[in-house]
Image (cartoon, helix red, strand yellow):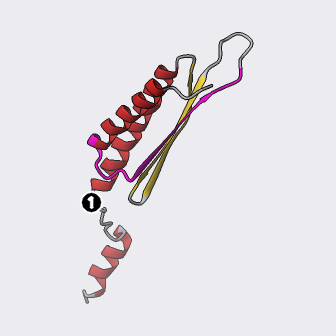
Amino acid sequence: MEPSDALASAAREKTAKLELFCPEIMACHVVIELLHKHRQQGRPFAVRLNLTLPGHELTVSRVENEDAYVALRDAFDDMKRQLGNTMRRMQEPEKQHEPPLGEAQLEGKEGTP
């Protein structure tokens, strides 16, 4: 299948929206494939996304639909959800774990006669 200018433009627009959502995006790779014909269905499109952030690589693989635009929308919706979860984890402060109760109790009893 020949690449479609309209489909490429839709992918660029969705990528730009992700960049507004998360300016730390370093790269976004979009692959749209026309799969082989199934017996009971038409020829579905498959969309894969690879997104690179500092210290993270996110992937959405194999979102399929007979409508290329629906497959593209669903793939970007999945990526936005992953990106939101990753951004939340990146912004959370590192948890400081307290020593286990047994160690804390022992330390307090050692100094007592």
* Residue at 33% in and 38% down: 16
Q: Give the range drawn in magenta.
A: 20-36
Across and down, in percent, residue 112 comes to 25, 86
* The N terminus - image quarter: top right
**Residue 79 image-quadrant placement:** top left
Q: Determine the residue located farthest toward the right in the rendered image.
A: 39
Under mark 1, the amino acid is Pro
From this view, report whether residue 98 is shown above or below residue 53. Answer: below
- Residue where numbered disc 1 is placed: 93
Across and down, in percent, residue 15 comes to 37, 38
From this view, report whether residue 55 is shown above or below residue 40. Answer: below
Across and down, in percent, residue 11 comes to 42, 32
Across and down, in percent, residue 34 comes to 63, 26
In reply to whether residue 28 is colored magenta, the answer given is yes
Residue 41 vs residue 7: left or right? Answer: right
Q: Categorize mark 1 by other alpha carbons within 10 Å: few (<14), some (14-19), many (20+).
A: few
Front one among 7 and 88 = 7
Mark 1 secondary-structure assignment: loop
